[in-house]
Image: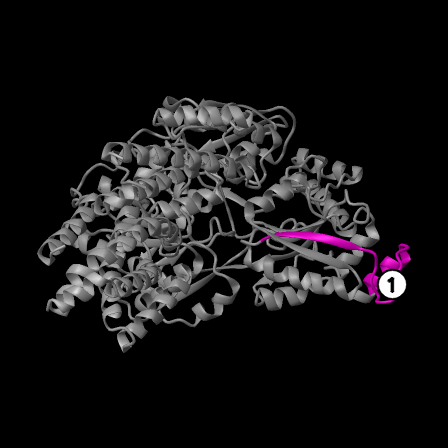
């Protein structure tokens, strides 16, 4: 298969996945109990006011009509207008997207930076104390629940030690360099929470694929040829062992986004995750649809890039 | 991959992420006009506070009062917004005609006088010294415009619900508005005055429908503060105006009010203890009150409740339609235990009356709370023809719904279930997510409803909503002709003494027939840093010490 066909096929699959995500999101939201008019208006709302609101939101039309209109809007790049806020969904999401990118991007980079070397070192010292510690850390990391970690970190580092502020993305009234420092300081705890819950799979995957790679003939041959162990480890074994971890990065993006919803909620971090939480309580369908489309597209595109990178790194993949 | 390429790559990625996050906000110019406010929107739009009229003014200080809240502003249009944070922030910009005192009586705010010239015509006389933050005077035209626009466009806020008998408002002079009613209604003038925010005609009329106007930038208000910057999900910064006639000295004292968003009240408490905020706007959970009262540097203020917690029995259900069953259920509730254990003594009995003691002018002390007596409940059921089985169980099983978001109710419903079990009645508890709870309540899909009303400020209006057929919150589906007549009469008479008699008779009917089981009025507690003082307490969580006049009067103790 040529590279062009391979890329085209991947893009086609990505578009199909996004279409599927759009449709499922649209239908799932309409299965939620309650109606948006009730969530938005005051509880003393009359039946007449409820009917007016449902008409205003377009929810008095058939499901098929709503779906058709929604797809048509989407094809024109229009995500609709928020039921609760009365402003375009694009505005709502763009206010929050940079913070989510900052948080998830930092967490992803840090997780890879810590997880990959630690996994390699654990594999190279198999059975030693570091290996055991990494395995324990990996299992614990996979069992952690974001809100529990968040509250614990807030209590220890926010309240007891007073090192970090409790909630938010920066301190009000800071400007210039001070603002950047404030942003970094507010990023530490939410980022740490995400790193802690994401680290486990990286550690375990890297360790196991490195152990496999180190057992391969080419590594034995390299050692027999007199290459230093460090060179065999970092140059030869790591290069091949990285492939499953690259796949993992793509797969973990979805979990990272899910973790960001909880993390942003616990830390009152002003990203899309907290926006989703608020939109759920308000049954704000357009905001939820827009946020899920955006997040689904991010994950699908990231996975597509991973697949393409994988194909480039390992030519056997694109011929499958 | 070689190491020397990895490090620059990682560095570049970090820089890219930070760059993507945008530029730092620039320091505001010293004396920009507050009307040129900008809406910040996360890091990309420069979310540092834009300049308002923040230069020191006579009587004011340069301090910023930071207040914690648990949600973002959903809607900046006060005619649409319904969340607590919407209310707290828009209240600081858009004045109400009337306020309320600690005894639940309406008192002047923007309006100095209000009442009726005849049974179908009401009036407000308003102050002449209010101006909008862009310098335009606030006149009776703004008041008339607001009321007429709400009636026409039907926005989702609370005010529209008060306009049932409203026909039209007319500004007969710059300081007087007359309101034409479709039928005599002695409650509507006070209720519109209390619930409605007045908006600037010269801004809102350009937007078309007030029901769809987002009002999300370039705010023009006439309250003590004007919103100047928004960092969605993070904070709302409001700068004081130069003149606010309702505060002593005419100038709000704190230079700025910042509302910061936290996920829940427990995190707010951490932030208060940590010094990140000066005050928590939300009422404290009962279990936290004593702890915070004993915490150095923190003061806790009691705020009278203006609502009640209750259970309604769905009278469409054949057993609950019978008075002895409702009386039996009412006798199985240990009200004292609920108030003392769950609410830690932070609640008062209403005497099982829908008119709470806080409404001193209306409350009837002769009504006594239902006695907790499971044996009497058994007797009532036996006398009504119900027979218990060998285990003492009556063939009565009810489904009680409550909101899982309501931590206090979630606790006391267990006591209700246990109490009923002692009398041989089975109650299945169904805790629901809030939207499901609202949907089931609206559809009448319950046997027993447990919940709260936050503000029941006017007995006649509230009893109409709660007990008249078709009333928006008539969850018991009661339709008692005698009760209907009493409530309807109380809404038309302008004779206060007669109204009081009628309402007390209505409350007694509700009490004696167990049309509603009012459990208690919760006293609320709010916490703030002892660095601040001078707050003015108003009843209910919506007003408490975050009422505009209270915040404008606050000063630092240092």
B59 horizontally vs B72: left or right: left
Q: In the rendered image, which residue does mark 1 sit on?
A: B389
Badge 1 crowding class, 10 Å Cα cut-off, few under 14, some 14 to 19, many 20 or more, is few
Question: Which residue does the image show at 41% across and 37% down from the upper left?
Answer: A287
What residue span does the magenta drawing correspond to? B376-403
B49 horizontally vs A167: left or right: left
Question: Which residue does the image show at 65% across and 35% down from the upper left?
Answer: B494
Q: Which x, y percent locates residue A57? A: 49, 29
Between B321 and A19, the residue placed more toward the observer is A19
Q: Is residue B47 visible?
A: no
Residue A37 against residue B351 in the figure, above or below: above
The quadrant where residue A130 appears: bottom left
Q: Assign the C terminus of chain A to one quadrant of the image.
A: top left
Q: Is residue A304 visible?
A: yes
Q: Total number of numbered labels?
A: 1
Q: Which x, y percent locates residue A291? A: 38, 39
Subunit ID for the residue under disc 1: B
Q: Which x, y percent locates residue B238? A: 31, 44
Q: Which x, y percent locates residue B217? A: 31, 34
Q: Magenta span has A65?
A: no
């Amino acid at each position: 298969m040529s590279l062009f066909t391979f890329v085209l096929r991947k893009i086609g699959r990505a578009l199909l996945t996004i279409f599927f995500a759009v449709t499922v999101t649209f239908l799932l939201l309409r299965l939620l109990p309650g109606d948006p008019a009730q969530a938005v208006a005051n509880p003393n709302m009359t039946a007449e006011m409820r009917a007016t609101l449902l008409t205003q939101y377009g929810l008095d039309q058939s499901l098929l009509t709503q779906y058709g209109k929604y797809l048509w809007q989407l094809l024109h790049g229009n995500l609709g207008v928020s039921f609760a806020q009365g402003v375009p969904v694009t505005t709502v999401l763009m206010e929050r997207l940079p913070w989510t990118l900052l948080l998830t991007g930092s967490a992803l980079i840090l997780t890879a930076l810590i997880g990959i070397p630690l996994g390699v070192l654990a594999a190279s010292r198999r059975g030693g104390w570091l290996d055991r510690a990494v395995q324990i850390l990996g299992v614990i990391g996979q069992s952690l629940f974001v809100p529990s970690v968040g509250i614990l970190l807030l209590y220890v580092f926010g309240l007891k030690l007073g090192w970090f502020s409790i909630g938010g993305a920066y301190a009000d009234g800071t400007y210039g360099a001070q603002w950047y420092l404030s942003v970094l300081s507010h990023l530490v705890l939410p980022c740490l929470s995400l790193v802690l819950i994401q680290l486990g799979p990286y550690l375990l995957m890297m360790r196991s694929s490195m152990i496999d790679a180190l057992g391969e003939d080419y590594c034995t041959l390299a050692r027999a040829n007199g290459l230093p162990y460090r060179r065999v480890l970092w140059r030869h074994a790591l290069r091949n062992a990285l492939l499953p971890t690259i796949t993992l990065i793509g797969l973990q993006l979805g979990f990272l986004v899910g973790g960001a919803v909880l993390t942003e909620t616990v830390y009152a971090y002003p990203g899309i995750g907290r926006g989703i939480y608020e939109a759920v309580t308000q049954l704000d369908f357009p905001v939820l649809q827009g946020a899920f489309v955006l997040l689904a597209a991010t994950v699908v595109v990231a996975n597509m890039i991973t697949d393409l990178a994988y194909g480039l790194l390992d030519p056997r993949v694109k011929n499958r | 991959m070689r190491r020397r390429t990895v490090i620059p790559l990682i560095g570049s990625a970090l820089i890219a992420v930070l760059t993507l996050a945008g530029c730092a906000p620039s320091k505001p110019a010293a004396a920009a006009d507050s009307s040129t406010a900008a809406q910040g929107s996360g890091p990309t739009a420069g979310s540092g506070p834009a300049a308002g009229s923040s230069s020191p003014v006579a009587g004011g200080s340069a301090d910023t009062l930071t207040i914690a809240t648990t949600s973002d502003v959903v809607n900046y249009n006060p005619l649409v917004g319904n969340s607590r944070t919407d209310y707290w922030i828009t209240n600081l910009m858009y004045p109400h005609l009337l306020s309320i005192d600690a005894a639940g009586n309406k008192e002047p705010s923007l309006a100095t006088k209000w009442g009726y010239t005849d049974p179908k015509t009401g009036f407000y006389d308003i102050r002449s010294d209010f101006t909008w933050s862009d310098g335009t005077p606030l006149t009776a035209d703004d008041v008339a415009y607001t009321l007429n626009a709400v009636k026409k466009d039907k926005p989702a806020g609370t005010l529209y619900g008060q306009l049932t008998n409203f026909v039209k408002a007319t500004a007969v002079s710059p300081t007087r508005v007359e309101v034409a009613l479709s039928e005599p209604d002695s409650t509507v003038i006070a209720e519109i005055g209390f619930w409605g925010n007045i908006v600037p005609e010269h801004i809102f009329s350009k937007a078309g429908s007030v029901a769809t106007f987002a009002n999300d930038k370039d705010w023009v208000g006439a309250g003590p503060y004007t919103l100047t910057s928004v960092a969605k999900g993070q904070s709302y910064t409001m700068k004081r105006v130069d003149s606010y006639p309702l505060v002593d000295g005419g100038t709000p004292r704190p230079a700025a009010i910042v509302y910061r968003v936290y996920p829940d009240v427990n995190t707010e408490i951490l932030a208060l203890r940590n010094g990140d905020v000066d005050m928590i706007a939300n009422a404290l959970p009962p279990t936290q009150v004593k702890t915070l009262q004993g915490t150095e540097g923190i003061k806790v203020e009691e705020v009278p409740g203006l609502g009640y917690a209750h259970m309604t029995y769905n009278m469409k259900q054949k057993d609950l339609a019978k008075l002895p069953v409702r009386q039996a259920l009412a006798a199985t509730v240990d009200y004292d235990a609920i108030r003392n254990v769950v609410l830690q003594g932070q609640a008062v009995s209403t005497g099982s009356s829908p008119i709470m003691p806080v409404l001193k002018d209306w409350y009837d002390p002769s009504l006594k709370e239902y006695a907790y007596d499971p044996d009497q409940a058994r007797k009532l059921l036996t006398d009504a023809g119900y027979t218990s089985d060998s285990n003492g169980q009556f063939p009565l099983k009810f489904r009680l719904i409550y909101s899982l978001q309501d931590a206090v109710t979630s606790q006391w419903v267990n006591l209700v279930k246990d109490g009923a079990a002692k009398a041989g009645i089975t109650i299945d508890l169904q805790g629901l997510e809030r939207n499901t709870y609202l949907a089931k309540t609206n559809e009448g899909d319950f046997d027993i409803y447990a919940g709260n009303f936050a503000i029941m400020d006017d007995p006649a209006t509230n009893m109409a909503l709660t007990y008249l057929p078709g009333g928006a919150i008539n969850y018991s589906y009661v339709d008692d002709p005698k009760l209907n007549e009493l409530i309807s009469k109380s809404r038309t008479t302008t004779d206060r003494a007669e109204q009081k008699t009628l309402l007390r008779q209505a409350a007694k009917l509700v009490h004696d027939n167990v049309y509603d089981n009012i459990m208690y009025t919760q006293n609320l507690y709010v916490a703030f840093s002892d660095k601040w003082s001078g707050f003015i307490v108003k009843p209910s969580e919506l007003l408490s010490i975050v009422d505009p006049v209270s915040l404008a009067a606050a000063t630092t103790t240092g």
